[in-house]
Amino acid sequence: MATETPAAPAEEPTSGCTDDLAYDVFARDCPSRDALKHVTDRWGSLTLGALLDGTFRFNELRRRVEGVSEKMLAQTLHALERDGLVHREAQQTNPPRVDYALTPLGDQVARQLQLLIALVEDRMPQVLRARERYDARHAAG
């Protein structure tokens, strides 16, 4: 008498994203989550916001985005370029020159991000008051 081999367990989906489904940033393995991270982390958002002002060379951009290290700016630009948000163009000059600018997609994303930046800047007095109240409550311990 032949024995039956148990069926292999069904594979569980690894994410809420596939090519034929809508992307879902809340799904753990969805690639939109990484793209959102690149846009919304501190240096990504500041870099995209700065590039709304036009094309920049690397050191010009570094001066515009105060506090970013050379290494972090390079990593940020690489990630944004990979996501199709930033265009990097190496000029054939001596000394070599590299320009960074927003792509059409990057411009769309940066304009939406600029609305958030403006809202945060506009609401800073309220944020600062909230921090003071919080700190006062928690300092009393």
Image (cartoon, helix red, strand yellow):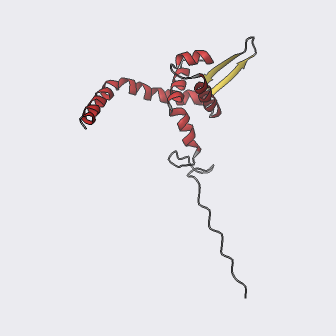
Q: Quadrant of the N terminus?
A: bottom right
- Give x and y (percent) for residue 59: 60, 16
Query: Does 139 appear above or below 5?
Result: above
Is residue 125 toward the left or the right of residue 34 in the image? left
The residue positioned farthest toward the front in the image shown:
141
Residue 140, quarter of picture: top left
Q: Is residue 91 visible?
A: yes
Residue at the image position 57 percent from the left and 47 percent from the top: 30
Q: Is residue 56 visible?
A: no
Residue at the image position 31 percent from the left and 24 percent from the top: 125
- Give x and y (percent) for residue 37: 53, 37
Tell how many labels: 0
The residue positioned farthest toward the top in the image shown:
94
- Nearer the observer, 31 or 95: 95
- Nearer the observer, 54 or 141: 141
Q: Quadrant of the C terminus?
A: top left
- Give x and y (percent) for residue 128: 32, 26
- Nearer the observer, 114 or 58: 58
- Give x and y (percent) for residue 78: 64, 30
Is residue 42 toward the left or the right of residue 136 in the image? right
Is residue 40 toward the left or the right of residue 123 in the image? right
Residue at the image position 54 percent from the left and 24 percent from the top: 47
